[in-house]
């Protein structure tokens, strides 16, 4: 989109030309644009979901963690050294769910510090994701003896803890690692899941949206201990975390935002593209290249007749 060509590209969302230019300048790093503080306030306000105040979040999470530490609801409390609580930012955009603590984690009472943790750190570094910006927890809070498979009643006993953690952090994206975590999260959010365990591999690296929640399953880093030849494919899947860690830079001025806020577009388009995998958005690619695309073109490249009629009935350039 160019300021001299209002009929082309990402239209406008009822913003003035000066403000659109300011936002574009801000993202392109070419200067503060117009009234930068006002633009930043607009961007922050447009992101939407309100978070719990810091002190309240910390207090609620601390109370939950005390219950986790004291839990003796199943047989695993007898064999564990520590019941592991989650760790990381309570304002994280991404919440990671592993299966259970390993031996080193059980001994020291911290998340991902064993062999799997080293691999996870390497994958984070390759993706440009700081571990301090995410929240990490386990589906089962206690170590499974001899690395055995979890029992259904153990998953059932611990699952309410995970539900509470998610409700406190309120992440934009839940990232389950491996089969058991993915199956549990899919079940909680009523995602159509594969019938066979072996088919879950096809879910890894695929962003889904269900019950108002984005979910991005990934292979557990421990799989690379046994199959290091999987590293290139796994690294590529983890690279998508960089994209999911921020909204599309064009979202504040994208007509998809305007259509959604006016009730003309389903939220899934915003969740899966504008605030999700925007790198896979056709609109994003064309906008970056400066190629013309009509405002009623969906993120997957299809033209939507309903949105075309809405655009014709209202001049988006003037709001």
Image: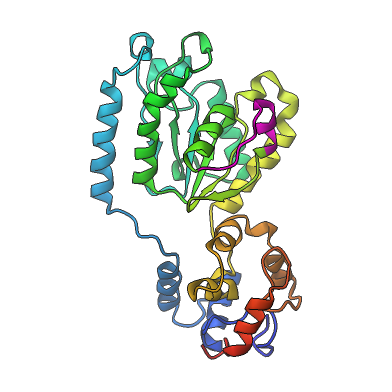
Q: Is residue 218 above or below residue 303?
A: above
Residue at image location 34% in from the left, 45% down from the top: 168
Q: Is residue 86 visible?
A: no
Task: Name the quarter where the N terminus is drawn.
Answer: bottom right
* Residue appearing at x 23%, y 35% in the figure: 63
**In-front residue for pair 158/16:** 158
Left or right position of 232 against 25: right
Of the pair 263 and 65, the residue shown nearer to us: 263
Q: Nearer the viewer, residue 141 or 261?
A: 261
Q: Is residue 200 magenta?
A: yes
Q: State the residue at coordinates (55%, 65%).
A: 266
Residue 118 shows in this picture: yes
Q: Is residue 319 magenta?
A: no
* Chain part drawn in magenta: 190-202
Point out residue 197 in the picture as x, y percentages from the top left corner: 64, 26
Residue 45, horizontal then vertical, whole percent? 40, 69
Q: Is residue 24 found left or right of 9 in the rendered image?
A: left
Asked which quadrant contains residue 72, the reply is top left
**Residue drawn at the location 72% of the way across and 73% of the way down:** 303
């Amino acid at each position: 989109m160019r300021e001299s060509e209002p009929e082309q590209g990402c239209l406008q969302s009822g913003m003035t030309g000066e403000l659109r230019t300011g936002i574009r300048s801000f993202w392109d790093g070419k200067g503060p644009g117009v009234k930068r503080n006002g633009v930043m306030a607009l961007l922050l306000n447009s992101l939407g979901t309100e978070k719990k105040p810091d002190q309240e979040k910390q207090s609620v999470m601390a109370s939950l963690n005390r219950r986790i530490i004291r839990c003796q609801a199943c047989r695993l409390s007898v064999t564990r050294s520590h019941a592991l609580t989650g760790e990381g930012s309570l304002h994280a955009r991404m919440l990671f769910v592993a299966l259970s603590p390993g031996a080193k984690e059980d001994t020291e009472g911290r998340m991902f510090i064993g062999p799997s943790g080293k691999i996870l750190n390497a994958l984070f570094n390759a993706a440009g994701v700081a571990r301090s910006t995410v929240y990490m927890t386990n589906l089962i809070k206690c170590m499974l003896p001899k690395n055995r498979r979890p029992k259904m009643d153990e998953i059932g006993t611990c699952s309410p803890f995970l539900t509470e953690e998610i409700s406190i952090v309120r992440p934009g994206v839940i990232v389950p690692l491996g089969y058991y975590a993915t199956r549990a999260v899919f079940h909680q959010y009523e995602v159509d899941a594969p019938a066979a365990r072996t088919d879950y591999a096809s879910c890894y690296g695929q962003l889904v949206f269900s019950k108002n929640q984005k979910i991005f399953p990934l292979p557990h880093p421990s799989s690379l201990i046994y199959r290091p030849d999987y590293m290139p494919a796994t690294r590529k899947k983890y690279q998508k975390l960089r994209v999911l860690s921020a909204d599309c830079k064009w979202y504040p001025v994208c007509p998809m935002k305007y259509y959604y806020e006016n009730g003309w577009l389903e939220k899934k388009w915003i969740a899966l593209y504008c605030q999700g995998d925007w790198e896979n958005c056709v609109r994003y690619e064309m906008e970056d290249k400066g190629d013309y695309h009509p405002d009623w073109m969906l993120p997957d490249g299809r033209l939507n007749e309903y949105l075309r009629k809405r655009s014709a009935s209202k001049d988006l350039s003037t709001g």
